[in-house]
Amino acid sequence: MKAVGARVPRYDGVAHATGRTEFVDDVRIPGTLWVKAFRSPVHSATMTNLDTSRAAAMKGVHVITWEDVPLLEYGHLSALGIPADEPLLAKDEVRYLGQPIAIVAAPSEEAAMAAVAAITADFQERPALFDVRKAFDADAPVIHQEGNWYTHFENEMDRRQIRKGNIDEAFDKADLIVQGVYRPAAIEHAPIETQVCQVVPEANGRLTIYSCTQALYFSMGVVAAHLQLPLNKLKVVGGTVGGGFGGKVDTATETMCALLAQKSGKPVKWRWTREEEFLCSSTRAPWHMEVADAVTKDGWILGRKMLTLHDSGAYSRFSPYGLTKHSFHHTGAYSIPNLEFNGYVVYTNRTPTTAMRGFGVTSVSFATETHMSRIALELGIDPFELRLKNANRIGDTSPNQIAYTDPSTVPTILAIADAVGHDLTSEYAGMTPAQRSGDLLPEHLVGQLGNPEAH
Amino acid sequence: MASEVLMPSSPSEAVSLFGDGAATTVIGGGTVVMPEITYGRLAPDRVLLLTNAGLDTVAVDGDTITIGATTRVDALAELGIDGLTACAGNVADGEIRSQATVGGNLCVGQGHEAPRGDLQGALLALDATVRSTGSDGERTESLETFLPHRHARLVLEVNFTRPAASAFAALEYPHTHEYTVLAVSGTRTADGTIRLAATGVAGPGARLRSAESAASDPEAAGAAAVNDVTFADDSLASAWYREQTLPVLVRRVLAQLEEST
Amino acid sequence: MNLTINGVETPIESGPLTSLLDVLREELGITSPKAGCEQGGCGACTVLVDGEPRRSCLTPAASVDGAAITTVEGLGTPENLSPVQQAFTHHYAAQCGFCTSGMMMASQAYIDGGGTDDREAIQHALGGHVCRCTGYVKIIDAVAAVVRGESFDPNVTAAGTAMTNLGGMA
Ligand SMILES: Cc1cc2nc3c(=O)[nH]c(=O)nc-3n(C[C@H](O)[C@H](O)[C@H](O)COP(=O)(O)OP(=O)(O)OC[C@H]3O[C@@H](n4cnc5c(N)ncnc54)[C@H](O)[C@@H]3O)c2cc1C
Ligand code: FES
Ligand code: FES
């Protein structure tokens, strides 16, 4: 255990500082073809007359469309039994601007661009939806093949729901109901290394895939499924990521490059432009969160009703998972004993959204922390004291009934108070995360206590 | 798709190679043209690369200043004109400023995502004249008359008189590459004439003439300025936001000019 | 065309409008400068042209014909790290490492140009460089340390100057 507590040098520090780290784009394989994509120029449309013949006739150019994909639809969470809803390459419907339709490989970047320019299709545009709240309206145009929200939570339920305690009683007893709506926007991860992949067809029949993925085994499974190949036909080389932040969890390039390598018999490389990265790569989701809290005059939160709409973009990908995490954390760092949470994964015509640094949780942290300050303001209570009073403590339970064994809310709030020079009364300044008792265990919190030893 | 690349080694050679300019793409610093080529949006047949054309001279003759078209943006600071220094210092970052040229900044087309051509504002406020060549031969005219039809002209030099005072104010944008959302430049000549110009408005930089005539009353000048220009939305800001903030910038520039009396 | 790259005179075959970045990466296989955006916006491609930091993606090859180019490969080797390389390692200034080459070249030019250890001045000098990982604090720590002439054991990682960017807020 030499490393524990020590300041160890980075294993890749010297390689970075000498420019020798081999990122995917730095892998040099002679004869590599450049890959470029023909993408949907519109947000939502029926596509007809896709014609790649002129591109395919160009010297040294190889083209793939949906017809070349052995298994066209395979979901990122298919392995967990979540049904696939997204074709690898668009077949007859396009649901977001930049959705890939045909992919070309050519001897040079210019030739690949020229080949893409030679591909044509007709698009019959439909109205597109970009606001998750509007997409949830009963009379919104239907934009996804399954309707405007995901319907495959447990028992084919159309939402992720949490019920804890007795919400009606909490709202009856409240002195005040404090409400708020919170709508964090989409964020592009913007790694400095754009999406990039190289695939080399090996003499032994395997495909070697150099990938910047953050989720190597995910990518391997996704490629194998689409190509209908056993895993032992794929060798994935990963581990060097030029920034990901969640944006390199989705398998954005590997499958299409693998197909092109198979079809051409040549090594291929696809490096997205910065423009593609911004326009076509997944983003953190925009969210719409409505919170209503039942509070008492002296600053206890008795109950929370919450509606969350998670903007999945055009397809579901990892969103059901992100929303589930969100639901487990929807009280933030605080103990609220009575809960009624309904969350929906809603489709829009945005680029499909994905993980980013605390998938599903940062949104609710933003909502909760803003809401705590709002409650403090409405009650005229010190916002630090309100937080410390309701902070998670050992033995309190999460929305999904997990007892906390080592919650850090109290020390964190105390550290913040210290950092900004906020004076606290000794009652609050001396708080610890110890199990609730005395004044800190009012009647309404008794029933939610769990056994921290059970975990 | 190889282009023919011409590298003149003197101003006169540049003029003759440019000819009527019809089918020629000029590259000064290349900071705008190069990405266009890389991204395949521009495939020029004939390129005039000005690197060695000898157009980077700066001549100071008393209060008269003449700067060659390929003078680098960062070299403008050396002239010691406050407003111009601030305006040039607000373009991109140091590395871009040491590559980008004045000619490129004057001739750059409107950006779709963000305004560019920031120097137009400072140079309009300096009442600069431009010497250029093109289909009807060489021409010297005010920058204001040049800007609307700068297409297919080769800028050779820009000329102006050192003002008694000059100032610059811009809307800051919190990002490493602060493309300027909206900016106002102002000058006062020895005889007290005030000139104001804005960039970040719709179209190229523009003089704020109504604001100039109301300059003695900064409130009124600010309010008048919105009638001198039109505004557009882009990815940095809305037209509405720009309209609200232009009067503020005009007042700031007038206050700076007042201070330097 | 000819370039003197890290001291070695090298004939260039790429076309005159090929970007210096492509000349280095694609023609010559010098991969330390990165293609982060190819439109001047990130700084990952910065190299020194006659000692000045330049976005190689914006630079037509013909415009630097005959120039001396320095890339990270010209700074030092793993066995013999330059001060900037030592400082970036010691101060944990490279996280994913993708922005690092450009950051180091710009830092080198700043230091060679007589830059001070003033944090704001360093920030200004690196203003065109985007790093999505580090939050910049440790990069600025590293550059300031080089200016101060500190020397490092690259096998030890320094404690960060945590929260220095909050300095003005409290
Ligand atoms: C990251 C980044 C940030 C930027 N930020 C700003 C900013 O804040 N403000 C701003 O104004 N701009 C900004 N720009 C845009 C650009 O760098 C500047 O406008 C610059 O001054 C353009 O000059 P150049 O010499 O590089 O232009 P070039 O790319 O060489 O040319 C630009 C245009 O002008 C033409 N041209 C060039 N020279 C001449 C000439 N002598 N005669 C006739 N036509 C000519 C070219 O044909 C082309 O159409 C930014 C660019 C980048 C990449
Ligand atoms: S690649 Fe040159 S600045 Fe981004
Ligand atoms: S270390 Fe990853 S972008 Fe800077």
Image (cartoon, rainbow, N blue to C red):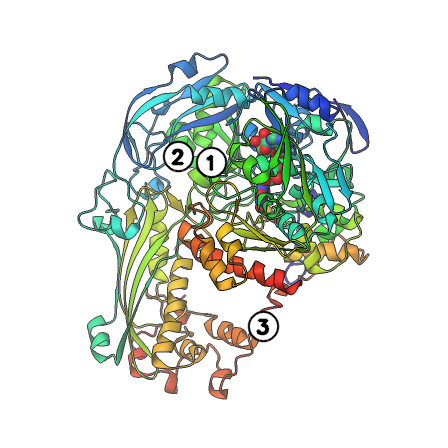
Helix, strand or loop at disc 3? loop
Q: Is residue A14 visible?
A: no
Q: Are marks 1 and 2 in contact (CB under 8 Å)?
A: yes
Tell me whether marks 3 and 2 sit on the same chain: no
Tell me which numbered mark, 1 or 2, is placed earlier along the sequence.
2
The residue pinned by badge 2 equals: A98
The amino acid pointed to by label 2 is Gly
- Residue B72: where, in percent of width, then height? 69, 40
Please state, as top left, top right, bottom left or bottom right, where the C terminus of chain B lies in the image: bottom right
Query: Which residue is found at the position 44% from the left and 36% from the top?
Result: A252
Calculate the distance from the C-alpha at mark 1 to the C-alpha at mark 3.
40 Å
The residue type indicated by label 1 comes to Glu
As drawn, the residue found furthest toward the front would be B191
Q: Residue under mark 1: which chain is it in?
A: A
Q: Which residue is mark 3?
A: C170
Q: Chain of mark 3?
A: C
Residue B116 position within the rendered picture, expressed as x and y whole percent measured from the top left: 54, 42
Query: Compared with residue A281, is residue B242 higher up or lower down, i.e. above or below?
Result: below
Q: Is residue A113 above or below residue A177?
A: above
Q: Which mark is residue B25?
A: none
Say if mark 3 contacts mark 2, CB within 8 Å.
no
Can residue C76 be seen here?
Answer: yes
Q: Are marks 1 and 2 on the same chain?
A: yes
- The residue where tag 1 is placed is A276
- Nearer to us in this view, B125 or A52: B125
Question: Which residue type carries mark 3?
Answer: Ala
Mark 3 residue's CB less than 8 Å from ligand 3 = no
Q: CA distance from mark 1 to mark 2?
A: 8 Å
Q: Is mark 1 within 8 Å of ligand 2?
A: no
